[in-house]
Amino acid sequence: MANLTGYDKFQIISVTGNKPAAPLSWFPRLVKFTADTGLNDYTQNAGLDIAFCVDGGDTELPCERLYWTDHGANVSAAFRVREPSVDSASDSDLRMHIGKAAGTAYATPEDTWNENGAGNFEAVWHLGDVGWAGGAPEALDSTGNAHQGTNDGTTNVAASVIGEGRRFDGTNDLITVPDHADLRFNSGAQDFTLSCWFTRNLPGGDAYQFLMDKRDANDDGWRLELVNGVVWASVNGIDVKTTTVITDTDVHLVQAVIDRSGNGQMYLDGSADGPAVSIGGQAMDNTVVLRIGEKSYTGFDDNFKGDMDEARIASSVRSAAWNLFEYDNVADYAGTITHGAWTAAGIARPKVGGSLAAGRVGLVR
């Protein structure tokens, strides 16, 4: 139980629109503020004196501070909060407490990504702002599994989907992550999901551009790749790909869901895209280094040219509901999340303004 006394202000932050199609458990919900005066006026310790809980409860929730930018009169900030349940029918309300003298940040923010002990997130690279471990420009793993990436040439870019992302030049920029059993999925029974946000910078990039690759020269392993604007994933040479051809320079979310006892399915911007492909339970013998932004085996070419953010690997089959809500929570934040007013502690819960219709609100595909 958290000690939630001593905080000066609180705010209710609700999922009121774009609710998931099915309830989600232990979802790392994005909470963000743009030029918020309350964060400037009421916080005591540059955003360290913050706690989240489910509205009506007093158990502090794990959270990770993604960034905190002080503009002088106001603050922009973003957090990931491990929410026990995001409902598909009713509003899901978090209570954010701020302004506690001698308050401290959540002690182990990597708990944000452990899904209450399930540990499905094997690696989460924010690829921009420092994150919990500090030390940019390396690519730090926020899960606590310590799959830290070594940066080779990539630079932070301010304008990305969540704070800062990473820019790849299409020539020799990459991030390398040491081999580990968590990342191999060698057993034919191991399901996994690969995902990242990216912007394809045209013209000038190769026809083949690797987002993430962990294969040897015999095609043993897995990959996530752009081929002439089509997103491909593969497991031991079995390919799953989108039907959509990306020719723009917009920000896109790709999710490759690999069910080893069933099908592989690509998702683009939260929705299934392209045919489901039978994967089967093939075993892999994959012990190569993971490369982000470049091919992983002999030649080390076909580099990605563009911006990337929030690269993730999970050892589970992410549902269609999870994938779409992840997209909406970021790409249509205003149509998904409603913020109430900052209210003095001890005053009754304020009503979150504006009742948005449940379901798909304000999002044009």
Image (cartoon, rainbow, N blue to C red):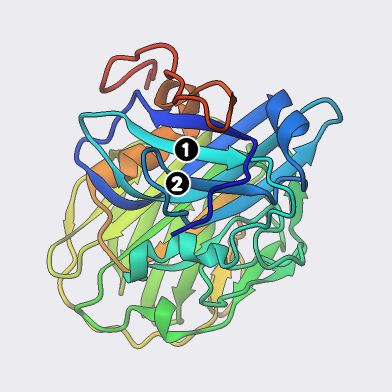
- Identify which amino acid the numbered label 1 is placed on: Arg
The residue shown at (62%, 51%) is 65
| Observer able to see residue 245 | no
The x and y percentages for residue 12 are 47, 30
N-term mark: 2 or 1: 2
Above or below: residue 209 compared with residue 294: above
- For the residues labelled 2 and 1, the Cα–Cα distance comes to 5 Å
Q: Residues within 10 Å of mark 2 (few under 14, many from 20)?
A: many
Residue under circle 2?
53
Determine the secondary structure under disc 2.
strand
Q: How many marks?
A: 2
- Identify which amino acid the numbered label 2 is placed on: Cys
The answer to whether marks 2 and 1 mark residues whose Cβ atoms lie closer than 8 Å is yes
The x and y percentages for residue 281 are 16, 76
Residue under circle 1?
95
The x and y percentages for residue 187 are 25, 83
The x and y percentages for residue 184 are 39, 80
